[in-house]
């Protein structure tokens, strides 16, 4: 590796792993399962030890030779590389993955697209094209009914939600939800474009929507990103990170 790993990351930091599927459609990349973990030890500049991920108290046995996109999270900075699991074992009660970095570490500039899994209530409704310019101004919006849904992951660039109804792909919708930011609850009213809609195989009648924000205020975006990083650190601490 040409990068010096220990200059940029440190043991104890949060790590996220996303499996690389060579046959996967690139459009599905954002839907890959992410496993959160932490960096245990830097063995060499191209080999690290990572804690085996645990979800709901269950150990996730990632396979030897499995290939992953690996993300290292710091204070408002993300580094990414490719990595392969070369060994796994238990040591002093800790389940460990040994991973070899197979690409150089790079600054992951698109931090606004880091998706955080969650369960947040959201209200929404479809907008007409003429409403986009005024959608963020509550007093100008007509008092039309909103539909309930649940956000299942969120980023600074968009969100994914599930609902008992389906919007049309490419439709524009008003998304209204609340986040706890800097010790207070704030309401966000953002316009989003529906990029994809899929009915869940295991839950007929429930529709998964992938949404990209449109003309989002830079301050709102930065607050959402900060919320995501804050919540990711809290979740990591709760799982023993």
Image (cartoon, rainbow, N blue to C red):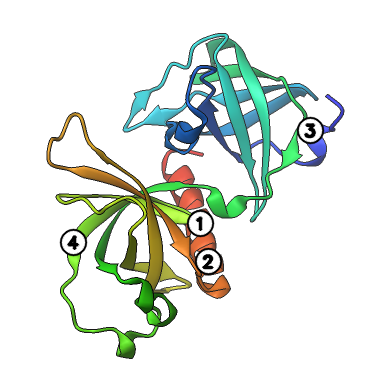
Question: How far is disc 1 from disc 4 in space, using C-alphas?
Answer: 21 Å
Kindly check if marks 2 and 1 are in contact, taking CB atoms under 8 A apart as contact. Answer: yes
- In three-dimensional space, the C-alpha distance between marks 3 and 4, rounded to whole angstroms, equals 45 Å
Q: Earlier in the sequence, mark 1 or mark 4?
A: 4
Q: Quadrant of residue 112?
A: bottom right
Label 4 crowding class (10 Å Cα cut-off): few <14, some 14-19, many 20+?
A: some
Which is more N-terminal, label 4 or label 3? 3
> How far separated are the C-alphas under marks 3 and 2?
30 Å
Q: Are marks 1 and 3 in contact (CB under 8 Å)?
A: no
The image shows a total of numbered marks equal to 4
Q: Distance between the residues labelled 2 and 1?
A: 8 Å
Q: Which residue is drawn at 65% across and 48% down?
A: 74
Label drawn at residue 221? 2
Cα distance, mark 4 to mark 2?
A: 22 Å
Q: What element carries label 1?
A: loop
Residue that numbered label 3 is attached to:
5
Q: Is mark 2 on a helix, strand or loop?
A: helix
Label 4 SS: strand
Is 239 placed above or below 180 here?
Answer: above
The residue carrying mark 1 is 157
Instruction: Give coordinates of residue 173: x percent, y percent.
Output: 32, 64
What's the residue at 47%, 54% (across, down)?
155
Q: Residue tagged by mark 4? A: 148
């Amino acid at each position: 590796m040409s990068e010096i790993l220990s200059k940029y990351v440190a043991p104890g930091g949060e790590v996220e792993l996303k499996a690389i599927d060579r046959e996967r459609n690139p459009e599905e990349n954002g839907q890959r399962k992410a496993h959160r973990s932490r960096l245990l030890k830097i063995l060499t500049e191209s080999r690290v030890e990572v804690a085996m991920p645990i979800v709901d108290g269950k150990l996730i046995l990632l396979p030897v030779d499995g290939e992953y996109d690996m993300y290292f999270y710091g204070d408002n900075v993300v580094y990414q590389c490719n990595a392969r699991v070369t060994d796994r074992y238990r040591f002093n009660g800790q389940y460990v993955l040994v991973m070899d970095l197979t690409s150089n570490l790079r600054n992951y500039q698109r931090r606004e697209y880091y998706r955080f899994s969650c369960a947040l209530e959201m209200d929404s409704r479809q907008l007409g094209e003429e409403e986009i310019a005024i959608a963020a101004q509550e007093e100008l919006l007509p008092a039309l009914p909103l539909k309930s849904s649940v956000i299942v992951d969120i980023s600074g660039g968009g969100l994914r939600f599930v609902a008992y109804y389906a919007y049309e792909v490419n439709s524009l919708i008003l998304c209204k939800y609340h986040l706890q930011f800097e010790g207070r609850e704030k309401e966000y009213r953002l316009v989003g474009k529906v990029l994809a809609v899929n009915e869940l195989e295991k839950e007929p009648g429930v529709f998964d929507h992938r949404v990209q924000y449109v003309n989002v205020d830079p301050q709102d975006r930065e607050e959402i990103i900060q919320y995501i990083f804050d919540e990711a650190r809290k979740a990591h601490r709760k799982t023993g990170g």
